Image (cartoon, helix red, strand yellow):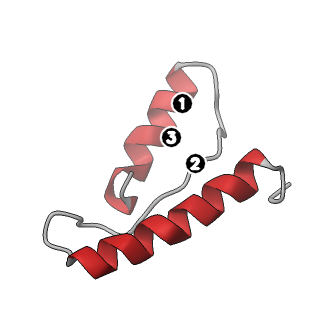
């Protein structure tokens, strides 16, 4: 999700019993970002997701 919705995601995680659940964010907004910028953001987010899944951020 974009950084603008972090507080909503944190609240949802808490409500669902997953307080502190790690997630990856990208810069807001995405609707006006150029394609090459979205590709760059997605690649960075994918790397962060992989690190989370592999436990590299522990």
Q: Residue at x 54, y 19 (%)?
A: 16
Q: Residues within 10 Å of mark 1 (few under 14, many from 20)?
A: some
- Tell me whether the residue at label 2 lies in contact with that at label 1, contact meaning CB atoms closer than 8 angstroms: yes
Q: Could you say whether the residue bearing mark 3 is in a helix, strand or loop?
A: helix
Image height of 51 relative to 21, above or below: below
Seen as rendered, the residue at the extreme left is: 32
Q: Which mark is residue 10?
A: 3
Question: On the image, numbered disc 1 is attached to which residue?
Answer: 13
Q: Is residue 42 left or right of residue 34?
A: right
Instruction: State which quadrant residue 37 falls in.
Output: bottom left
Q: Is residue 12 left or right of residue 52?
A: left
Q: Is residue 3 left or right of residue 56?
A: left
Q: CA distance from mark 1 to mark 3?
A: 5 Å
Question: On the image, numbered disc 2 is attached to which residue?
Answer: 23
| Closest to the observer, 25 or 38 | 38
Q: Could you say whether the residue bearing mark 2 is in a helix, strand or loop?
A: loop
């Amino acid at each position: 999700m974009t950084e603008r919705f972090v507080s909503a995601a944190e609240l949802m995680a808490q409500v669902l019993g997953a307080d502190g659940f790690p997630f990856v964010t990208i810069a807001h907004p995405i609707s006006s970002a150029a394609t090459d910028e979205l590709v760059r953001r997605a690649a960075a987010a994918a790397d962060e997701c992989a690190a989370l899944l592999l436990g590299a951020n522990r």
